[in-house]
């Protein structure tokens, strides 16, 4: 399917505004125009972390299905899990358009969307309707741009979706909401984690895992502070990372000066270095989901070898089409068999020291 997309679908979609093309892809998944693929049930790809059993380690990152419209359709493409959102308590338009820019020569995207979404209530209705469906669906929560109490917005997300989420992601790493990344500072992070985790623990029923999503533009000192706070709280895992503000090494001449976060292939090295450095800091027990620049089986496995238990992608599907998930997952099975490796989890951390020894790019 990716080859056909490369020949026909991409050419047609890239004639459209990026946001219009995205909306069209959501509609295609809703209506079943995009065919499902047979599940890869290779037991060697199963990963058990944070009390959840993932059928394979590849997930759809937040940002694609912002309003929880197509999580099950994404799972049917071959993803082992899907993450919806970012969801804010109140609906918001986000930043002014245009706000999404393709960098075709770099297989990258710059966006300054700003948590555009329909709010908690809309997503709650959709997720309630699919609650009997199988599959792991995480909920990425954030705060409204004009919020007077950002921490309270995250707490509201935990309360609203606790009965529906397979896991939560606390997103404090988007560069497109002014001041949001300030929550990564140690004192602010301490308050956020305390209130979010206390709220989670106070909810009845099953204990829902909470992951913290951080930026790739952090200093070594900031990584130290985050690791220290994580060690003091009952956080269930990390997601590394969100988009970057860096524009280093880009080939494209168009749109590179646009403000916003950069995702895609150029993010791979930076995000993988930060991943490995955090793995060294938090130890072997804390689950980590690696995100940033994954475009193939090789890059997905490289993230795992650098310290990730699971991985997510989004931007590469824009450039390679909806068959990419199946190709990567099948490639993982083939690689394990070829190398006589019993499980995908056995590859985790094999290259942590090599990646962590690299400097975070300036």
Image (tube, helix red, strand yellow):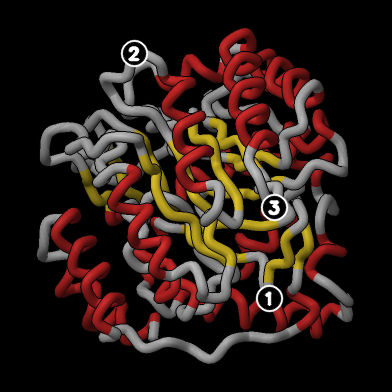
- Residue ID at (59%, 70%): 80
Residue 87 point in image, percent of width and height = 37, 42
Mark 1 falls on what kind of element?
A: helix
CA gap between label 2 and label 1 equals 45 Å
Label 3 Cα neighbours within 10 Å, binned few <14 / some 14-19 / many ≥20: few
- Residue ID at (69%, 35%): 201
Residue 270 vertical placement versus 138 (above, below): above
Q: Are marks 2 and 3 in contact (CB under 8 Å)?
A: no
**Badge 2 is on which residue?**
148
Q: In front of the other: label 2 or label 3?
A: 3
Q: Residue 206: which disc?
A: 3
Label 2 Cα neighbours within 10 Å, binned few <14 / some 14-19 / many ≥20: few
Q: In front of the other: label 2 or label 1?
A: 2
Residue 29 point in image, percent of width and height = 30, 76
Q: Which corner quadrant of the image does residue 355 belong to?
A: top right
- Residue ID at (68%, 51%): 205
User: Mark 1 vs mark 3: which is more N-terminal?
Assistant: 3
CA gap between label 2 and label 3 equals 31 Å
**Badge 1 is on which residue?**
332
Residue 18 vertical placement versus 324 (above, below): above
Which is more toward the observer, 260 or 62?
Answer: 62
Which is more toward the observer, 343 or 253?
Answer: 343
Residue 150 point in image, percent of width and height = 42, 20
- Residue ID at (32%, 86%): 4
Q: Which corner quadrant of the image does residue 28 belong to?
A: bottom left
Residue 307 vertical placement versus 294 (above, below): above
User: Mark 2 vs mark 3: which is more N-terminal?
Assistant: 2
In this picture, residue 212 sits left or right of residue 309: left
Mark 3 falls on what kind of element?
A: loop
Label 1 Cα neighbours within 10 Å, binned few <14 / some 14-19 / many ≥20: many
Q: Residue 107: which disc?
A: none
CA gap between label 1 and label 3 equals 32 Å
């Amino acid at each position: 399917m990716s080859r056909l997309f490369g020949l026909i679908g991409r050419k047609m979609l890239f004639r459209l505004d990026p946001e219009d093309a995205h909306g069209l892809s959501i509609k295609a998944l809703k209506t079943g125009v995009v065919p499902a693929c047979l599940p890869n049930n290779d037991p060697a790809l199963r990963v058990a972390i944070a009390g959840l059993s993932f059928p394979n380690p590849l997930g759809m990152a937040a940002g694609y299905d912002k309003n929880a419209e197509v999580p099950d359709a994404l799972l049917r493409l071959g993803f082992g899990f899907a993450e919806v959102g970012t969801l804010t308590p109140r609906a918001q338009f986000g930043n002014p358009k245009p706000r999404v820019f393709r960098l075709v020569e770099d297989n990258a995207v710059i966006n300054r969307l700003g948590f555009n979404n329909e709010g908690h209530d809309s997503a709650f209705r959709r997720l309630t309707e699919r609650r009997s469906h199988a599959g792991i669906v995480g909920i990425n929560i954030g705060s409204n741009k004009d919020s007077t109490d950002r921490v309270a917005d995250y707490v509201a997300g935990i309360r609203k979706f606790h009965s529906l989420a397979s896991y939560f992601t606390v997103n404090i790493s988007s560069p497109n909401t002014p001041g949001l990344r300030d929550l990564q500072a140690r004192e602010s992070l301490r308050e956020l984690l305390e209130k979010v985790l206390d709220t989670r623990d106070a909810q009845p029923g099953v204990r829902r895992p909470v992951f913290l999503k951080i930026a790739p533009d952090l200093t070594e000192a900031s990584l130290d502070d985050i690791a220290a706070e994580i060690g003091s709280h009952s956080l269930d895992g990390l997601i590394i990372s969100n988009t970057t503000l860096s524009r280093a090494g880009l080939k494209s001449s168009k749109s590179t000066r646009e403000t916003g976060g950069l995702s895609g292939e150029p993010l791979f090295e930076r995000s993988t270095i930060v991943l490995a450095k955090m793995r060294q800091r938090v130890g072997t027990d804390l689950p980590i989901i690696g995100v940033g620049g994954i475009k193939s089986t090789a890059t997905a496995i490289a993230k795992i070898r650098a310290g990730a238990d699971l991985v997510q992608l989004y931007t590469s599907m824009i450039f390679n089409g909806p068959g990419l998930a199946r190709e990567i997952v099948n490639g993982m099975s083939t690689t394990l068999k070829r190398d006589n490796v019993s499980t995908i989890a056995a590859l985790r951390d094999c290259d942590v020291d090599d990646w962590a020894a690299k400097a975070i790019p300036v």
